[in-house]
Image (spheres, helix red, strand yellow):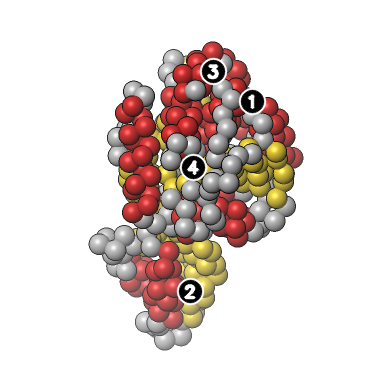
Amino acid sequence: MKEDVFAYIDDHKAQMMDLWQDLVNQDSPASYREGVDLVAKRVFKELEEAGASTRWDEEGKALIAEIPGDSRAPVLLLGHMDTVFPVGEAARRPFTVEGSRVTGPGALDMKGGVAVMLSALKALHSAGFSGRLLKVILVSDEEIAHNGSKATVMLQREARGCAACFNCETGYEDNSLVIGRKGGVVFKAAVHGIAAHAGNNPRQGRSAIWEMAKKIDDIQNMTDWDKGITFNVGTIKGGTVSNAIPDYCEVEGDIRFQDPDISPFVKEELFKVLNHTYMEGTKTELLLYHEGMLPMKMTEENRKLFEFVKKTGEENGIPVSEGKLVGGGSDSGYVVYAGVPTVCAMGVKGRFNHTRDEYALKDSLFERAKLLGAVILKMNEV
């Protein structure tokens, strides 16, 4: 059957490229409901051709599909349909193939990964695959950390009990896959001081910038490399003119950590810094504390599943180098938290996602579709 799956992919490269192009050329930022719905409509069609029954989960704003199978634990395929790029970007930078590279908004993250997933499923269906139930979850608001939906609850509910999960997120050119990801928090804080003339009455002023500068130093020094915790103040604004004591200063920051159980500790430590006052007469206010993606914990089960994928790749001449930890988040964290072994970054390979320099490697579409198909077939033997 594997030979039939691989032959299908080899014979349908043009159709796979057309699918990739159609997905990329449809704008689908999470806020653009019409665009996301059009992507979902195309994906629905492809899944039905792969023998799946499909439904829309309104709670999680996600497309869920199942290809019927036996009573064994299902295999879950995971991804997202939204991108970070605004409406109009597809018209400005449409899907383009130049040599070995494919460009266009979301070509790498992760319209290419969606094309990998759908193509592998269609190849399996064409080859007469039967066995384990295959489940697909494609969310529509991953890039905004599901702000406005209950996808995080849905993902854990739907994933629970699955034998394994393969997330077709952004792949890497070094042929590595991902078995761990950091989670993150975005915060915004402001210091309110007292304005005064810097020459005439500086003692009456209370510098919000000075107070915030001391707090920034404290925040940055909370980074613990050994525990995989990083604090970063990324933006700062405040003051009006150089000869006035500033009465306002605002910062935005990012916190990353590997262990989901450490989240309460991180929050507590940040609050300690913000609640400590260096300069009497200033007041610090927390404007935003938004927990983003849950960390993808590096479990022993993830490592074993990676070795399974790597061995499958070796058997089929498909390079897989290492299983690694990365700083960027994905929905894999919620699936691992639900107790499901997961390997992430199974999608097309490339670089510079979330930027206009983003590109994917054309042939990785076919390579990764074969790898995913081969892994599913081998999972069916276990």
Residue 175 vertical placement versus 302 (above, below)? above
Label 4 SS? strand
Label 4 is placed on what type of residue?
Asn
The residue carrying pointer 4 sits among few (fewer than 14), some (14 to 19) or many (20 or more) residues within 10 Å by Cα, namely many
Label 2 is placed on what type of residue?
Val
Q: What's the CA distance linking mark 1 and mark 3? A: 20 Å
- Residue found 60% across the figure and 39% down from its top: 69
Label 3 SS? helix
Q: Earlier in the sequence, mark 4 or mark 3?
A: 3
Q: Which residue is mark 2?
A: 191
Q: Earlier in the sequence, mark 1 or mark 3?
A: 3
Q: Which residue is mark 1?
A: 22
The residue carrying pointer 2 sits among few (fewer than 14), some (14 to 19) or many (20 or more) residues within 10 Å by Cα, namely many
Q: Circles 2 and 3: CB distance less than 8 Å? A: no
Q: Of tags 1 and 2, which is closer to the observer? A: 1
- Residue found 64% across the figure and 29% down from its top: 50
Q: Which residue is mark 4?
A: 167
Return the residue nearer the eye: 107 or 134. Answer: 134
Residue 288 location, x and y as percent? 54, 67
Residue 25 location, x and y as percent? 63, 27
Q: Of tags 1 and 3, which is closer to the observer? A: 3
Q: Quadrant of the C terminus?
A: top left
Q: Earlier in the sequence, mark 2 or mark 3?
A: 3
- Residue found 39% across the figure and 57% down from its top: 297
Q: Circles 4 and 3: CB distance less than 8 Å? A: no
Q: Of tags 4 and 1, which is closer to the observer? A: 4
Q: What's the CA distance linking mark 4 and mark 1? A: 21 Å
Q: Which mark, by number, is residue 8?
A: 3
Task: Tell me if I can see residue 12 in this picture.
Answer: yes
Residue 310 location, x and y as percent? 34, 35
Q: Earlier in the sequence, mark 2 or mark 4?
A: 4
